Image (cartoon, rainbow, N blue to C red):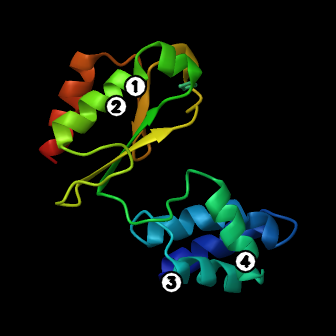
Amino acid sequence: MFTVEAKEQLDNIVKKYPTKRAALLPALWLAQEQYDGWLPPEALREVAGYLEMPPAEVEGVATFYTMYNKEKIGKFHIEVCHNIACMVRGADALIDQIGEKLGIGKGETTPDGKFTLSGAECLGACANAPCMMIGAKYFEDLTPEKVDAIVEEYKKK
Ligand code: FES
């Protein structure tokens, strides 16, 4: 459920748009924050109710964009860009390296629920490929050594 503060945030977001439905993307983003990083069916229903939209339409948008998680994710979501610029600069090997380090494959979550590893489409940082995000934080110009250090750092958190 949205907290009182989140509902106020949502009210403020909606005020910036000409119609309620135009605020769907930021509303989903806020819902994802409220629901521990993913969008369970009740979150989609809550957003649909608030924006007075058909639930199927809200679900259609949420399932279209990869930035919205449709399944529960780990505390730290590692998203390695596997699009062209990052791919030619070694992204696939970095994904394998992280997977081996954490004992999971792409699209999986560690048994302790701490990490989820995903491949991502272009993160908009092609000039500094290869890159990845953990939550909202960017890591660019990655090397195997840098990735190793970053994962170790997050293991301690
Ligand atoms: S291709 Fe990786 S950030 Fe654009």
Judge depth for marks 1 and 3 and give the one in front: 1
| Horizontal and vertical percent position of residue 84 | 58, 21
In the picture as drawn, the residue positioned furthest to the right comes out as: 18
Identify which amino acid the numbered label 2 is placed on: Ile
SS for callout 2? helix
Name which of mark 4 and mark 1 comes first in the sequence. Answer: 4
Q: At numbered mark 3, what does the secondary structure look like: helix, strand or loop?
A: helix
Tell me if residue 93 comes above or below residue 74 in the rendering. above
Q: Is residue 127 above or below residue 91?
A: above
Q: Secondary structure at mark 4?
A: helix
Badge 1: residue crowd in 10 Å (few <14, some 14–19, many ≥20): some
Amino acid, disc 3: Val
Asked if the residues shown at circle 1 and circle 3 are in contact, with their CB atoms under 8 angstroms apart, the answer is no
Q: Position of residue 8 (x, y in %)?
A: 59, 77
- Separation of disc 4 and disc 2 at Cα? 34 Å
Q: Check if mark 2's residue and mark 1's residue have beta carbons within 8 Å.
A: yes
Crowding near the residue tagged with mark 3, few <14, some 14–19, many ≥20 C-alpha atoms within 10 Å: few
For the residues bearing labels 2 and 3, Cβ distance under 8 angstroms: no
Taking 143 as reference, is 112 left or right?
left
| Residue drawn at x 63%, y 63% as measured from the top left | 62
Q: Which residue is mark 3?
A: 4
What residue is at 44 percent from the left and 44 percent from the top? Answer: 136
- Distance from disc 4 to disc 1, alpha carbons, whole Å, reads 35 Å
Q: Which mark is residue 16?
A: none
Proximity of marks 4 and 2: CB atoms separated by less than 8 Å? no
Which residue corresponds to mark 1? 92
Q: Residue 51: image x %, image y %?
A: 74, 79
Who comes first in sequence, dot 4 or dot 2?
Answer: 4
Please give the residue where the numbered disc 4 appears in the rendered image: 56
Query: Whole-Å distance between the Cαs marked 2 and 1?
Result: 5 Å
